Image: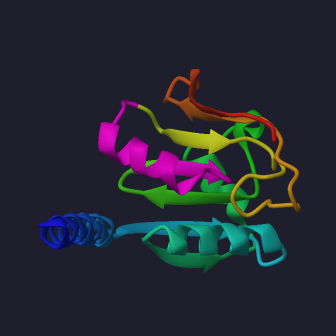
Amino acid sequence: MKKVKHFLAATLLLSAGFAWADVAQAEEKIDIVVNRSPTCSCCGKWVEHLKQNNFNVKDVVSDDVQAIKDKYGVTQELASCHTALVNGYVVEGHVPAKDIRTLLKNKPDVVGITVPGMPSGTPGMEMGSKKDAYQVISFDKKNQHQVFSNYQAE
């Protein structure tokens, strides 16, 4: 009887593992266009972060990323080094992939989200174990800002 219980328990655990793997693989691949400068290495690292998180990235290297920022209302106080476009939203700077997915799932009435500046520890800005506290900020057409998510220093 013990062998049967162990077999059933092992089968149940194995089935749960396969089910979890199927859910992870079924996560929708999202198309995103990243506009970045040819001289910025951290932007390339952020692109890799997106690819590792199931984004299909079109990497546009440009000498005039500022024109994209201006076109989509990314002000100097919201700016970082690269600007991405995804499903009608702007994603500025080193925003974690999970926040982009949350944005697309919840579909708020905003222009986009940003991590202003270049805080250490954000995706693409990893500097050893140092991680600055930072916020992901949403912004709308009236340039009103709201905290979208918070990350603590480590």
* Colour convention: rainbow
Q: Position of residue 111 (x, y in %)?
A: 47, 38
User: Left or right of 80: which side holds 88?
Assistant: left
Q: Residue, x 54% and y 32% (percent of image)? A: 138
Q: Quadrant of the N terminus?
A: bottom left
Q: Is residue 28 magenta?
A: no
Residue 51 visible? The answer is yes
In depth, the one of 17 and 143 nearer the eye is: 17
Q: Name the image quarter holding residue 123.
A: bottom right
Q: Position of residue 118 (x, y in %)?
A: 81, 50
User: Left or right of 68: which side holds 80?
Assistant: right
Q: Residue, x 55% and y 59% (percent of image)? A: 84
In depth, the one of 6 and 46 nearer the eye is: 6
Q: Position of residue 19 (x, y in %)?
A: 22, 66
Q: How many marks?
A: 0
Q: Residue, x 42% and y 58% (percent of image)? A: 86
Q: Position of residue 137 (x, y in %)?
A: 61, 32
Q: Is residue 133 above or below residue 100?
A: above
Q: Name the image quarter holding residue 143.
A: top right
View extreme (front): residue? 1
Q: Is residue 108 magenta?
A: yes
From which residue to which does the magenta span run?
Answer: 90-109
Q: Is residue 128 above or below residue 105?
A: below
In depth, the one of 134 and 8 nearer the eye is: 8
Q: Quadrant of the C terminus?
A: top right
Q: Residue, x 39% and y 69% (percent of image)? A: 31
Residue 73 visible? The answer is no
